[in-house]
Structures are given as structure tokens and as C-alpha cells.
């Protein structure tokens, strides 16, 4: 088993427009999916992220950050256990919002110094 | 249903996967879709022919012979008939058909389905299709999906099955060992799918539990099984022992407190205890922990008489193996029943702040029950109402409504 991070990406401008009730509804759908990941003993942890944030570079803090307007901004993360990258990707593919084309998920293995490949 | 239809259905359940894999092994020129079509057509042809002429002496052998001939014709038509046909007999060595016992060939298929590149849910679906031999309609019903949804899932898996020749090549000895954990997970998921109370009393659910038990027992008896297989088997047996007691006389869902414990199957519990103690290996698996918890519930004469302190300790162990908020939820509930109220509520309210858990019906249901038990009607009602917003399963809704009525 290896650990992977699902970096969830979607249109943050849309997300902001949608408002709180709609976001709660989406989180409910994601919760059902997360529950299925827990059943198959893959789920470790995760959370959606607020749309607001700060973007920091060497000499300044850009208050709004470039991500508010981002078409593919990071809207959440999920940490899972999976057999390998293929399986992790196959699991991510099962996300209902990915199926609908509303989300993209970047699947990245956590760096593990002892099994560098 | 006529006798022929029943016979054909029975043979489908016991032979579909085996016929498929033997066709794939028979000729490298046949792809998965064609092989599935041939096997399906063979069953249709059997129905027509046997209705007319009566059952042949050996129906299974008939099916294998006809499907092989159809495969041969198909290969010939494709003008690929060269030297790729493997010599030999593809009829089963013992064509006497028995419905249940898992034989070696099915075990091989099970390990083939546990391919590490497939998502666990897809592994389960293809196991139900090729090892348990369920039809796509039945699989769709089990997962509450449309046939189209299952087909799409299979479509992606088929590519992999084809590219990697998953049903065609026997997994190597090394693969058998490395896939054992995935096989356990598949069996665990199939059993749980059957055990889920949210679906109510459906015949197909009990059949799933039964199939999972049969496959797990065969795995335990085979050379590949390990202590985890035994722990998993014990877990299933403990839960199976309580299957019949989970619903009341009107089919309503009963919780542990309401269940008539005299209906629990003592033989299954004893068998489970034997397997659990035999499975104490060097490392303790999550299956072992879950089985031990289920065993403590089975051993108790009433909910109040349950050894909660032992259950709490096992949950702590389980959290070390499998740290996630869903396990924490169960741990907190055990803490509450064990008398550690403040600690339990502290954990549950922390979980409530998490985005996903905050939308999880069982968290709200648990908080509702705890506040009801504490006599805080107002909070109990609020959490039960939240629960109703978060679940769609009719049996669960009825269950929560009953809890709300109790509070009033």
C-alpha cells in the first residue's frame, strides 16, 4: 500500500457564485463517495477548501491570489491508501463530479524516500 | 418457471466464469467481448434446445462443447485459424455441476479479478460477474446503479482485462501472495454489500453474504490463505449469526438493543470463535479487530452486559491500523456505552466540524441517540432531523422516524 493525495480541482469562480447551500449539497455528494472509499479501506482524511486565500511570493503577499479566477483551482484534497498509482487513478475516476466533468483530480503519490521509483 | 429455465439459470450461476476463462485460454484469437457473447449465446441456445428435446445427460458438458464449437467457428470465420489453438480438452474435469463449493478454477478467477490496477469497486463488480456469475442486471440492483452505469464501469475495466489478459493468464505464485490482501478486501466488500441494512430484507442480499462466506471458506482451506483469511472468515460468521435477528416481524430494522438475542445462531458463533482464535498470527489485521469486536457483541447477553472496555481497547488498536474519522466515530460510540460520556461527546462534536463527517448521517444519528439517552429531547430531535436530511434509504428513514417517536 502507498499513500496518495487527490488534489481536487474545479472552477473556483463558479464555486463562489454557487453560494453556500449549493456547496453544502455538493459536499453531501462527496461525503457519500468518501464513505464508499472508507468502506473499501482506502480513505485516510480530506477536506474541501475555502475559496478565499492568500498567495505568497518572495517579497509580497498578493491578497486575493490568482486562484479565485482559476478555471482549475484547488477546491479540496483527499488522502487515500492504494495499491499503486494506476489503482489510485482508477479510484479517483470513480468520483461522481469527475464523471460529470465538473471536477478534475490530480493524483500524486506522497514522496516515500525508501521506495523511490 | 419451467424446469429447463431453472436448470439453465443454475448452470449460469455455476459455469459462466469458468466457460469464459476456458474459452479465453482455448484460443488467443478470441477477445473478451466475443467470448462473453459466445457464452451468452450458448445459454440461449441451451434453453431453446433443451425445451424442445429435453435435458441432455450432462448439461454442463453440453454447454462447454457447444461454446467451444462456436468459438472454433468464430475463429475460423475470422480466418485466423492457424496454429494458435491450444491442443487439449476444455471440458471441465468433473462436469458434475454443484452450485456452491468454490473449486480451484474459481479461486484462480478470484485472484485474477484482484488485479492491483483496478479500483476496489471494479474488482468487486468483475468478481460478481465472472466468479459469482451474476448477471449485469443483478449487479446493478446491488449497487443501486443503472445497467448503463455498470456497463460503463465494465467498459473501462474490459480494456484492462484485455490488455493485461487478466482472465486469461493464471496469476503467478508471487502475484497470488501479493494479491491476497486485495482478495480479502473484495470478499469483505461483497459480504458488507449483502449485510448493509439500508437495503432492507432482499433475497439477493443474503445470497451475497452466502457467496462471500463460501469463497472465504475456500480461501481459508487453500494453500494461499493466511491468518487474515481466517480472521475475515470469523468476522463474516459473527455477522452472519445475527442476520436473521436484524429485522422485526414487519420487516423493520432493529438495532443491537432491540434484537432478540436468542435468534442469534449459536453454531455460527462457535464456529467463528474457533476461526478467530486460530487466526491469531504475528500481526493483527483490521479484520481481526473487527471480528473481535463482533465476537464481544455476540458473547454479551444484553447491550448493557457488553464488555465495552474490551471493545474500546480494540477500537484503539484499530485506529492504529486504520486511522480515519469513520473509525473514530465508532470508537466514540463505544466510549459512550462504556461510560466515558464526556470523552465520547468531545470526539463526536470534533468530527461534526469536519466537512465530510459533518454531512454523514451516521454521525448525526449517533449524536441523536446519545442525546435521547441523556434525556436531552431538543438536541436529540435536532440530530435526528439532520439524519433524515442526509439519508435516502427507506429502511433507515423508517428507523430514524421510530427513534424520533420514541423521544416524543
Image (cartoon, coloured by chain):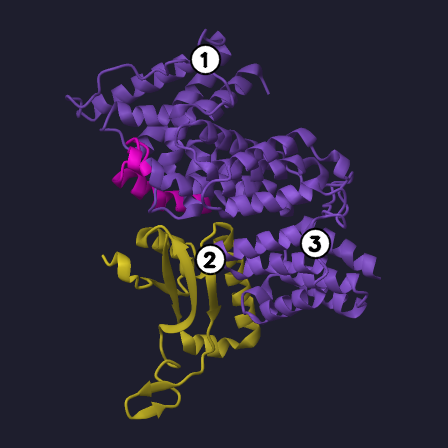
Chain colours: A yellow, B purple
Q: Nearer the viewer, residue B222 or B371?
A: B222
> What kind of element bears circle 2?
strand
Magenta-drawn stretch contains A38? no
Q: Chain of mark 3?
A: B
Residue at 50%, 57% in the rendered image:
B320
The crowd level at tag 1 (other Cα within 10 Å; few <14, some 14-19, many 20+) is: few
Q: Which mark is residue B96?
A: 1
Residue identified by numbered label 2: A43
Q: Is residue B351 above or below residue B218?
A: below
Residue A52: x and y in percent read 45, 82
Question: Residue B390 vs residue B122: left or right?
Answer: right
Q: Is residue B83 visible?
A: yes
Q: Nearer the viewer, mark 3 or mark 2?
A: 2
Quadrant showing the N terminus of chain B: top right
Please tell me whether residue B173 belongs to the stretch shown in magenta.
yes
For marks 3 and 2, give the CA distance.
Answer: 26 Å
Image point 37% across, 81% down: which residue?
A69
Residue occupying the point 57% across, 31% down: B210
- Magenta stretch, residue numbers: B149-175
Numbered disc 1: secondary structure: loop
Query: Does the residue at mark 1 contact the one at mark 2 (Cβ under 8 Å)?
Result: no
N-terminal-most mark, 3 or 1: 1
For mark 3, does the 10 Å Cα neighbourhood hold few (<14), some (14 to 19), or many (20 or more) residues? some
In this view, which residue lies farthest toward the bottom?
A59
Q: Position of residue A61 (x, y in %)?
A: 35, 91
> Which residue corresponds to mark 3?
B397
Amino acid at each position: 500500500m502507498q499513500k496518495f493525495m487527490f488534489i481536487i480541482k474545479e472552477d473556483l469562480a463558479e464555486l463562489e457564485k454557487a453560494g453556500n447551500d449549493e456547496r453544502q449539497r455538493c459536499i453531501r455528494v462527496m461525503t457519500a463517495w468518501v464513505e464508499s472509499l472508507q468502506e473499501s479501506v482506502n480513505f485516510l482524511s480530506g477536506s474541501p477548501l475555502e475559496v478565499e486565500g492568500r498567495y505568497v511570493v518572495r517579497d509580497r503577499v498578493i491578497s486575493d491570489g490568482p486562484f479565485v479566477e482559476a478555471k482549475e483551482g484547488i477546491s479540496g484534497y483527499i488522502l487515500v491508501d492504494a495499491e499503486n498509482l494506476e489503482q489510485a487513478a482508477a479510484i479517483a475516476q470513480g468520483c461522481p463530479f469527475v464523471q460529470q466533468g465538473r471536477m478534475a483530480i490530480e493524483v500524486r503519490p506522497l514522496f516515500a524516500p525508501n521506495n523511490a521509483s | 418457471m419451467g424446469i429447463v429455465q431453472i436448470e439453465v439459470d443454475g448452470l449460469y450461476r455455476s459455469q459462466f466464469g469458468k466457460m469464459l476463462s476456458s474459452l479465453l485460454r482455448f484460443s488467443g484469437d478470441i477477445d473478451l467481448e466475443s467470448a462473453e457473447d459466445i457464452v451468452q449465446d450458448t445459454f440461449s441456445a441451451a434453453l431453446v434446445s433443451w425445451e424442445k428435446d429435453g435435458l441432455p445427460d450432462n448439461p454442463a458438458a453440453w454447454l462447454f462443447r457447444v461454446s467451444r464449437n462456436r468459438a472454433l467457428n468464430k475463429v475460423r470465420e475470422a480466418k485466423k485459424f492457424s496454429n494458435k489453438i491450444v491442443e487439449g480438452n476444455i471440458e471441465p474435469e468433473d462436469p458434475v455441476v454443484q452450485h456452491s463449493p468454490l473449486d480451484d478454477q474459481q479461486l484462480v478467477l478470484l485472484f485474477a479479478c484482484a488485479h492491483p490496477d483496478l479500483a476496489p469497486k471494479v474488482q468487486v463488480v468483475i468478481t460478481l460477474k465472472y466468479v459469482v456469475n451474476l448477471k449485469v442486471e443483478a449487479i446493478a440492483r446491488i449497487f443501486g446503479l443503472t445497467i448503463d452505469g455498470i456497463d460503463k464501469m465494465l467498459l473501462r475495466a474490459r480494456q484492462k482485462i484485455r490488455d493485461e489478459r487478466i482472465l486469461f493468464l493464471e496469476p503467478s505464485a508471487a502475484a497470488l501472495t501479493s494479491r491476497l490482501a486485495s482478495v480479502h478486501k473484495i470478499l469483505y466488500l461483497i459480504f458488507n454489500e449483502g449485510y448493509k441494512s439500508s437495503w432492507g430484507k432482499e433475497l439477493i442480499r443474503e445470497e451475497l453474504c452466502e457467496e462471500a462466506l463460501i469463497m472465504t471458506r475456500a480461501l481459508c482451506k487453500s494453500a494461499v490463505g493466511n491468518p487474515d483469511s481466517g480472521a475475515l472468515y470469523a468476522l463474516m460468521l459473527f455477522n452472519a449469526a445475527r442476520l436473521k435477528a436484524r429485522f422485526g416481524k414487519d420487516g423493520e430494522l432493529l438495532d443491537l438493543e432491540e434484537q432478540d438475542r436468542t435468534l442469534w445462531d449459536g453454531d455460527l458463533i462457535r464456529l467463528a470463535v474457533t476461526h478467530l482464535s486460530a487466526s491469531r498470527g504475528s500481526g493483527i489485521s483490521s479484520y481481526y479487530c473487527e471480528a473481535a469486536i463482533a465476537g464481544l457483541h455476540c458473547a454479551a447477553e444484553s447491550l448493557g452486559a457488553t464488555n465495552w472496555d474490551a471493545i474500546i481497547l480494540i477500537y484503539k488498536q484499530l485506529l492504529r491500523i486504520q486511522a480515519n474519522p469513520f473509525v473514530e466515530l465508532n470508537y466514540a460510540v463505544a466510549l459512550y456505552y462504556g461510560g466515558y460520556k464526556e470523552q465520547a461527546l468531545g470526539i463526536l462534536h470534533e468530527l461534526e466540524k469536519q466537512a465530510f463527517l459533518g454531512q454523514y448521517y451516521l454521525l448525526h444519528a449517533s449524536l441523536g441517540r446519545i442525546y435521547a439517552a441523556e434525556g436531552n429531547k431538543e438536541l436529540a430531535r435536532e440530530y435526528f432531523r439532520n439524519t433524515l436530511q442526509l439519508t435516502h434509504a427507506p429502511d433507515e428513514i423508517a428507523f430514524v422516524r421510530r427513534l424520533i417517536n420514541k423521544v416524543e
